[in-house]
Image (cartoon, grey):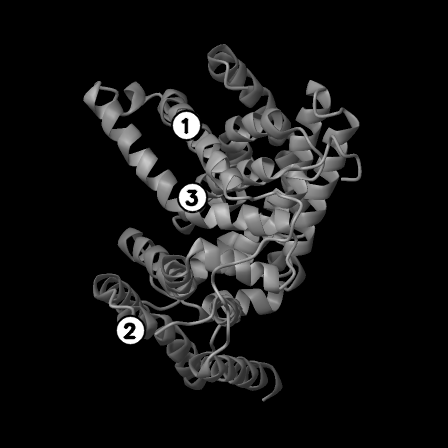
Amino acid sequence: MEKKSNRLKAKDFITIGIFTAILFAVEFAFGMLGYIHPFIVASYVVILPLASGIPMMLFYSKVEKFGMITIVSVLLAIIMFVGGMGYLGAPLIIISGIVADLIAKSGNYKSSKKIVLSFGVFNLWICANYFPILVTADSYRQDLVDGGYSADYVNNLFAAINVKTIGILVVLAFAFGCLGAVIGKAAVKKHFAKAGIV
Amino acid sequence: MKLDPRTKLFMIFVVSLIVMMSATTPFLWAIRLSITLIPIILLILEKKYASALRFLIAYGTALILTFFFLSAESEGLIASLLIGYCGIVVQFMPALITAWYVVRTTKIGEFMSCMQKMHVPDGIAVSLAVVMRFFPTIKEEYSSINDAMRMRGVMLGGGNVLKMFEFRMIPLLFSCVNIGEELSAAAITRGLGGEVKRSSVVELKLGIADYLLLTFLTAATVIFVVFKYFL
């Protein structure tokens, strides 16, 4: 943030706010599906990166300054906290945001490869939300049962997300993040670059 | 009644904290319920009867269903859908009501001056204010895009999920980007992002109601934690 020409300005903050809102709206729309079946909760790592690819790629091309993704991740952490997703995941969300930011910065926010990579890392924030399921497994299970979930749901949830599968989920989140970025880039090029918005 | 934005933020914090820790005994449920009732009462005091009633009915129905008709053993499709619905409502409704109340009753100016008083970095404060303001806009834009699509006969994208998604997402992004440009133009003319420290018309001060509510919320949190984890 030290370089003067690369500092975020008021306009960028507004852009960041807007895209965070869009990202969260997408997340919320799909997140509600998770109540139908726990396997959908696990498949967020596939759905969300693909769905948020287009807006995020547009976002990457609109700001191009260091700090943009960090702020998004801080806001996401705040919203997730308010939404009752737990405080354990919040630091992880912010860390994945900072790392993603650094990767994109190393490519000067122009290099496609670095952006794809960075979005892959950014999507690890989805896994951060699984964190309470892993770390506090026993008490969390008890909490869910007491909270009115059926035993069936809870069992399936823990079958889908546990210490063994988290590795696969992380890899999936990263891989589909990269895929989402590629698709998003193509869509941005198809619609927005032509229209002169980027 | 006018509450200080800081009290409201603290209320959001407390409500989400208590909702996160599940209630296991009737006593804990009582605390949780009374915490949930606060924003509803506040909504009534603000004369927003319709939304208060809506929330009350939705929350009440879900609670009654959870306690009297559903148990950990219930099976079947309808039961699992109901559990899903009740799970969402019971888990997220309290936080949602509070957030709704805060967004509805806090002016952006108040919010910004509150953030400034708490020494939150400008970047996060501005972005957060925009997020807060932007959710209703997204909803509005989305429904008008949906209407436009329906008018042209693009009902569900011909069953193609990708098309369906693309036809809604791209126009939505277009309009959001445009609104963003207008918003930043408007904000910059009002001196956002200047070098000088911004002053505020709104003078923030904690009143009696604020202190009462703050005390009550803190007490509720402490009692909840003590009874859940230490007794």
Res. A149 in view? no
Callout 3 secondary element: helix
Q: Residue at x 70, y 25 (%)?
A: A109
Chain of the residue displaying label 3? B
Q: Position of residue A160 (x, y in %)?
A: 55, 48
Q: Amino acid at mark 3?
A: Phe
Q: Position of residue B152 (x, y in %)?
A: 22, 18
- Which mark is nearer the camera, 1 or 3? 3
Q: Between marks 1 and 2, how big is the CA–CA gap?
A: 38 Å
Viewer-proximal residue among A148 and A104: A104
Relative vertical location of residue A93 with respect to residue B114 in this rendering, above or below: above
Query: Which residue is labeled 1 in the image?
Result: B169
> Of label 1 and label 3, which has the lower sequence position?
3
Q: Amino acid at mark 1?
A: Met
Quarter of the image that includes the N terminus of chain A? top right
Quarter of the image that includes the C terminus of chain A? top right
Viewer-proximal residue among A80 and A151: A80
Q: Is residue A96 left or right of residue A193?
A: right
Determine if marks 1 and 2 fall on one subunit. yes
Q: Position of residue A122 (x, y in %)?
A: 65, 38
> Of label 1 and label 2, which has the lower sequence position?
2
Viewer-proximal residue among B202 and A65: B202
Determine if marks 3 and 2 fall on one subunit. yes
Query: Which residue is labeled 3 in the image?
Result: B134
Q: Amino acid at mark 2?
A: Leu
Chain of the residue displaying label 1? B
